Image (cartoon, rainbow, N blue to C red):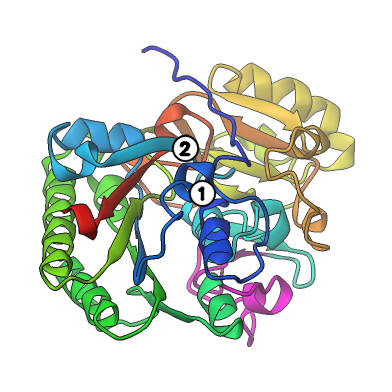
Amino acid sequence: MKRPEIILPDYKNCIANLPNSILKKFNAEPRGDSLPLLDRYLTRDYKNIIVFLLDGMGKVILERHLSEHGPFRSHLAGIYTSTFLSTTTAATTSVMSGLQPCEHSWLGWDCYYPEVDKNVTIFLNVEQGTKNQAADYNIAQTLTPYENVVDRIKRHGGQAYLEAPFADRSIKDFRTLCDRVQAHCEKPGQKYIYAYWNQPDSALHGNGCSSKVVKRVLKRSEANITRLVKELAAKNEDSLIIVTADHGHIDNRQVWLRDYPELYACLERAPSLEPRVLNLFIKKEKEDFFAREFPRTFGEDFDLLPMEEAISRGLFGTREPHPRFRSMLGNYIAIAKGDLSIMTVDEEFKSMHGSLTEDEMLIPLIVFDTTSA
């Protein structure tokens, strides 16, 4: 199998920059650099600026399943990068906040919080690999809070809305999500609307990157957004509709760390973050052994770096980190460079994401303008 190309996050041209273009447009102070790829579309005033984020719809997935002559690919404005990690937790928090991962510290599906000495599945507020509540308060929102873009625009006197299944459980299908967006568009006044959908990510995890299920999901999303564009145009609703993703996917092989007892015995606690990027706290007396044995065992598939090297290279971001950022990370990080994932809990996925391969890192920026639809 050909080794995938490695793509480093470009914090001048990534998903964390997109919301800063929106903030700048609404005269709300940006949190960092804007996205030049989007800025050129924001030179005129629109009544509605809408961002649809389709979880997992990376460049490679888009090209594999949708026609180059279809609505999405024919309206492709360009390709840019996800964050590191290329995962929903880090990337969607960046698109909701305008912060780089080192700034918001929502780094992966499972994050270590020294205050509770636990790996926490932060979207669910449970202990890693269990259904047990990690605390009687929301750990991530309490210890690493952030202001989202919608609230920031409102605080500066603008109109803004968020629509997503995680915010409203009555949104059970993509058509309903689009209808919610359209209802906001028809209200008077200039506004920003952020709409998140959890597909094709779920279909990809369960069925793999080449699945017909994934193709159906993507074609349905494309059809619904195209319908929305046409209906807004017919009603003279002056709107810019941006469609993007948080990360891509790669079909993966999986191994379980428990099957390597000598390596597992070197750990102070279970790895956190993601199966394709492992945050490792290594016992001091075991560091030399681990630094030698892990590359011998997994060197074809993973790079093992001292954590300070990963931080100094700017993988997590280039701006001032959150005060808790460094304490959440161990002394080593293992980063997948092939198709292998190292699992720490009993789950199986056909495809995964989180690391630096082009399949995971490259994402599309698709733009529709209803005035030219």
Find numbered disc 1 in the image and state the secondary structure of the residue it sits on.
loop
Is residue 328 highlighted in magenta? no
Give the residue drawn at x 77%, y 26%. Answer: 291
Q: How much space separates mark 1 and mark 2, taking CA atoms?
A: 8 Å
Residue 323 visible? The answer is: yes
- The mark nearer the N terminus, 1 or 2, is 1
**Horizontal and vertical percent position of residue 204:** 28, 46
- In the rendered image of this protein, does residue 280 appear above or below residue 168? above
Pointer 1 with pointer 2, Cβ within 8 A: yes
Which one is in front, 220 or 350?
Answer: 220
The tag on residue 351 is none
How far from the left and from the top, in percent, is residue 88? 47, 55
Q: Amino acid at mark 1?
A: Ile
- Asked if residue 373 is positioned above or below residue 143 in the image, the reply reads above
Q: Position of residue 83 (x, y in %)?
A: 56, 45
Q: Which residue is mark 1?
A: 15
Pointer 2 residue: 80
Q: Neighbour class for label 2 at 10 Å: few (<14), some, many (≥20)?
A: many
Q: Amino acid at mark 2?
A: Tyr
